[in-house]
Image (cartoon, coloured by chain):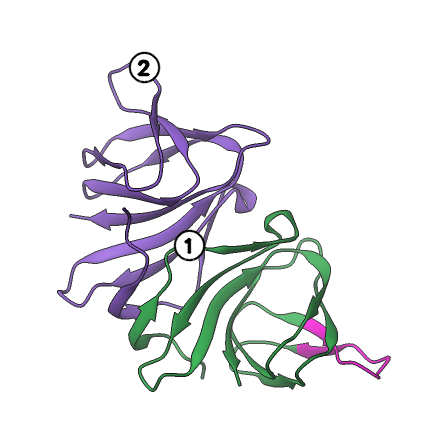
Chain colours: A purple, B green
């Protein structure tokens, strides 16, 4: 099970476009005031920097991710969550020919 | 002036990915129950089909659009709105090297 609808959100209609559009997200504020984004990653291998810690939740498709200080790629699909520490970098990839990875990213 | 925040929305966290990611949007339901989406178009010339009539509002960047039955490309930027009839097709383009066009699309 994964989140299929986020109610009572405040949505910033201007998208965040990363890596020439390989990742596109929209920033939202949840009903409880937490910041989050809803986004999609197309087939690519990308490195992101974090500010606040992040929790990623897959809502469609799948990705592989590699956390800082590890050599291991781990797979995450629909309903899977993984945490990324703040002020670091991590790798995420979606293989060519695979479905895009759709996610909710919870900050803080 | 354009809309900078949409409050009280229900957000579908799974993105709509069109034309290999040249257009990515997220579907939302507004507080008053109307359906809409927030999206971005990267540099490309695209043809979209409509079901319900649509009102497009630019929130960042600019595009040119060509409505059905016309030969004229019209420019629309931040705060500009244009209407597209239902059950038709229309063209929209963002020139190479231009900023992406960020929009809210109101349905019905």
Q: Residues within 10 Å of mark 2 (few under 14, many from 20)?
A: few
Q: Picture quarter containing residue A13?
A: bottom left
Q: Chain of mark 1?
A: B
Point out residue A58 in the picture as x, y percentages from the top left corner.
Answer: 33, 42
Nearer to us in this view, B98 or A9: A9
Same chain for mark 1 and mark 2? The answer is no
Q: Picture quarter containing residue A61?
A: top left
Picture layout, residue B10 above or below residue A46: below
Point out residue A92 in the picture as x, y percentages from the top left corner.
Answer: 39, 30
Nearer to us in this view, B14 or B81: B14
Q: Chain of mark 2?
A: A
> Circle 1 is placed at which residue position?
B14
Picture layout, residue B14 above or below residue B69: above
The residue under the point 13% across, 65% down is A32
Residue B65: within the magenta? yes
Q: Residues within 10 Å of mark 1 (few under 14, many from 20)?
A: many
CA gap, disc 1 to disc 2? 27 Å
Residue A89: within the magenta? no
Query: In what element is the residue under mark 1?
Result: loop
> Circle 2 is placed at which residue position?
A72
The outermost residue toward the left is: A32
The outermost residue toward the right is: B71
Q: Is residue A25 left or right of residue A21?
A: left
The magenta stretch is B64-75
The residue under the point 66% across, 83% down is B86
Q: Is residue B39 left or right of residue A35?
A: right
Point out residue B74 in the picture as x, y percentages from the top left corner.
Answer: 73, 80
Residue contact at pointers 1 and 2, CB within 8 angstroms: no
Q: Nearer the viewer, mark 1 or mark 2?
A: 1
Picture layout, residue A23 above or below residue A87: below
Nearer to us in this view, B47 or A85: B47
């Amino acid at each position: 099970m994964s989140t299929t609808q986020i109610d009572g959100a405040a949505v910033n209609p201007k998208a965040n476009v990363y890596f020439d559009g390989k990742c596109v997200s929209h920033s939202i504020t949840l009903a409880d005031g937490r910041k989050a984004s809803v986004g999609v990653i197309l087939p690519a291998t990308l490195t992101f920097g974090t500010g606040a810690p992040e929790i990623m939740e897959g809502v469609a498709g799948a990705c592989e991710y590699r956390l800082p200080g590890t050599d291991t790629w781990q797979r995450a699909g629909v309903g899977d969550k993984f945490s990324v520490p703040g002020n670091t970098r991590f790798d995420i990839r979606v293989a060519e020919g695979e479905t895009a990875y759709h996610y909710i990213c919870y900050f803080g």
